[in-house]
Amino acid sequence: MKNTLGYLPSLRGMPVSASAPPDSLLTQAQRRRLARISTRVRLRARAVIFRQGDKSDSVFITAVGVVRTFRDLPSGRRRVTAFLFPNDIFGLAQHGKYVNTAQAVTEVVLHRLPLQSLEKALRDDGRLQFPFLYKVAHELRQAQRQSIALTRRDAVGRVAMFFSMLERERSGHEDKSVIVVPMSRSDIANYLGLSLETVSRATARLTRQGIIAVPDRHAVRVLDRARFEHLVASA
Amino acid sequence: MKNTLGYLPSLRGMPVSASAPPDSLLTQAQRRRLARISTRVRLRARAVIFRQGDKSDSVFITAVGVVRTFRDLPSGRRRVTAFLFPNDIFGLAQHGKYVNTAQAVTEVVLHRLPLQSLEKALRDDGRLQFPFLYKVAHELRQAQRQSIALTRRDAVGRVAMFFSMLERERSGHEDKSVIVVPMSRSDIANYLGLSLETVSRATARLTRQGIIAVPDRHAVRVLDRARFEHLVASA
DNA sequence: CGTCATTTTGAGGTATTTCAACGAAGGTGG
DNA sequence: CCACCTTCGTTGAAATACCTCAAAATGACG
């Protein structure tokens, strides 16, 4: 037993308090503390925030806009690993280096949290870690869900799922009837593990079947909610 | 800012200390504490540990053997989400309920950590959370990597990658030249998002090409390391 | 308003899925 | 300990869906 716990298990699944609060549990004092160590950064679209392999010195929180992270693979290909929306944290590192490149998709405003300060804050206030732990569990669930999504073999279903994800992401914002699609088709294709053409054809098919409407490249409207949700769910 | 941090960002990427220690940092006292609140459980192969939707009351750590977790999808299909090896923790929950079903693949020995006790321990010793946080970041990286793996369209590459994963998992155990494959072909297929037949054909092909040997269903030996690694890497 | 990148659309090739049948292995009971 | 039965794995053949290559059309941007 001693040994088992000594090795400190890798968290394949995650312990989550049965009574864990749904969202933030930060006290006013904690918020102030985090605000104090962060810097506000504004970047134009396409700006690179950090590169894969760079020494990691900060963690970022998206305040406004959308960020994408991608990874260069040994084969030379490039794979989009995530899209970050407001209130998402990013800056995943290993061995002191970022494992992804992060780039602004739209104009963005970020909060930059220097690792050193953040570590100190976490050390000083042990309870600050709790909400982090909780959120990580949430992200791990998301990651599992994404893995499930990626094993779907039908392109139409994957694309529908992607739009659905975008919709949830922006729920509570602006015009709810329209899904905003800030990224390019080729980003979507890359993220979903499909070819650009297949994504194009899939959206065309969804449109032809009257399930969605695509007023312009960066907007999608769901016309037939029932069939849309059915596609999303039938993994 | 206040608001942003108040909502507590979802951790898409993960903050990881540049100087974070590679593995456990548990003190003797911490280990003892965790050991004190855990129960040792022994289960035969195929035993169900908990079911998706059950009220989550514990977190588990694999001590001996292999566990698989799977999720029942709305479509009625069932997807294997993970395999847990010694020193892995599992018991991912949301809203107080397990999100996966966990089942023993082999005979297993587990440590059961009641959530209530674990929470208390974490609360009492804030530093206990740090290694957890670190490990979760690690798992998140793993999850990202798996997502990347799943977008590969070539079956042979995915299967090779799976064997490679198994190999790393058991590194440092027993006979290193043989990869132990405790799970069934259909589990592998399900996990990789391939059909059972395709997995079978892929392993047959790897064998035919002299890259691996398959003495029996639960063992694989790498014959041509160079080509094997090449397949694994060329995502 | 023209240029360039992005997206759409078409045609053919290929890999995986499906369907089907056979063979092997493991577990159980007599 | 063997026979039986059930589960699991292998192999073959046809259908489907995606990928690649190629070219036209649309939209973004200066």
Image (cartoon, coloured by chain):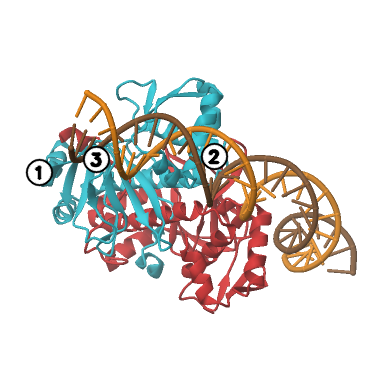
Chain colours: A red, B cyan, C brown, D orange
Q: Which mark is residue B155?
A: 2
**At label 2, which amino acid type do we have?**
Ala
Chain name for mark 2? B
Q: Residues within 10 Å of mark 3 (few under 14, many from 20)?
A: some
Q: Nearer the viewer, mark 2 or mark 3?
A: 3
Do badges 2 and 3 share one subunit? Answer: yes
For the residues bearing labels 1 and 2, Cβ distance under 8 angstroms = no
**Residue A41 visible in the displayed image:** yes
Residue at image location 17% in from the left, 43% down from the top: B111
Establish if B121 lies above or below A8.
Answer: below
- Classify mark 3: helix, strand or loop: loop
Q: Earlier in the sequence, mark 1 or mark 3?
A: 1
In front: mark 1 or mark 2? 2
Which numbered disc flags the more N-terminal residue, 2 or 3? Answer: 3
Q: Earlier in the sequence, mark 1 or mark 2?
A: 1
Q: What label does residue B36 carry, if any?
A: 1
Estimate the spatial distance between the alpha carbons at disc 2 and disc 3, rounded to whole Å: 28 Å
| Residue that appears at 26% across and 66% down | A21
Identified by mark 3, the residue type is Ala
The local secondary structure at tag 1 comes to helix
The kind of residue tagged 1 is Arg
Q: Nearer the viewer, residue A234 or A141?
A: A234
Q: Is residue A111 above or below residue B27?
A: below
Which residue is drawn at the image coordinates 49% and 70% (left, top)?
A229
| Vertical order, B4 against D16 (above or below) | below
Residue tagged 3: B45
Where in the figure is residue A156, as x and y percent of width and height? 58, 61
Q: Chain of mark 3?
A: B
